[in-house]
Amino acid sequence: MITLYGHSQVPFTEKVRRAILYKGLRFELREPANADDYRRWSPKTGMLPAVDIGGENIADSTEILFALDARFPDPPLLSPDPTVASQQRQLEDWADASFLWHYMKYRRMIGEGAPLPTTADAEGDGAERRSAPEIGRGAHALRRLGAWLRAGGTWERPITGLLRELGLRLDDLTNFLGARPFFYAERLSMADLGVYAMLFTMRNDSIPGASRLVARRPPLVAFMARVEDATESAAAPAAGPPAG
């Protein structure tokens, strides 16, 4: 029996969960309730997800996928072609880093407090500014200049810029996938699990508005359905003893 430790809505946990399902293995998912669970379940790093496989504790979602492939090689998570396998590993790593970068940017953004002004806001409060003391006008102008610079030199709200960036990355993925069922191969790999986990979390609107970005790209919606079908159909034999 494999024990998977991690929050079910975190993309890295979902990536590992799908890999275990794909291999048709028995497992139990345990979600942390407090900080002590992190330290107890992941003593080496204090970070989740982590798994227990036969008494061995393994942390980090990518390392877990490698460990699963080594112990339960069928079906494989990497192509037998070394060049293709390298490309699959790179895409999985990119998916992890890309989503995390955008999500952390969003967290920093909401931690700043009030949203930045829109163009309408910038033009609609002139009367108040003219009636304020001179020092007040100067401070207001400095705040507005800082807001403008933080928004990347535009008056759009930061969330608008962030969603635009995410949309461009989704367009890259759509174009890269093309007419293939999966990335780099005709069958699922760790690259697909990494991308799926990122899309899964976006579909759950972890960044407000991200679910609409995914829904507007039918090839990615269809890709997610193929990953779900491949992993959930493979999970049927899990009632018996794990392979390997």
Image: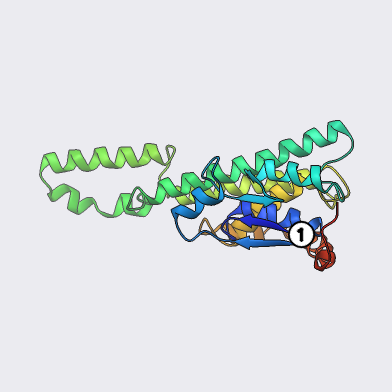
Which picture quadrant has residue 135?
top left
Taking the image as shown, residue 179 lies to the left or right of residue 195, namely: right
Residue 91 lies, with reference to residue 37, above or below; the image says above
- Identify whether 139 is placed above or below 31: above
The mark tally for this picture is 1
Residue drawn at the location 51% of the way across and 44% of the way down: 46
Residue 91 point in image, percent of width and height: 72, 39
Picture quadrant of residue 136: top left
State the residue position of label 1. 21
- Can residue 142 be seen here? The reply is yes
Looking at the image, which is closer to me, 238 or 90?
Answer: 238
Quarter of the image for the N terminus: give it.
Answer: bottom right
| Type of amino acid at the residue the image marks with label 1 | Leu
How far across and how far down the image is residue 26, in percent?
Answer: 76, 62
**Residue lying at the far left of the rendered structure:** 133
Q: Secondary structure at mark 1?
A: helix
Residue at x 29% of width, y 55% of height:
124
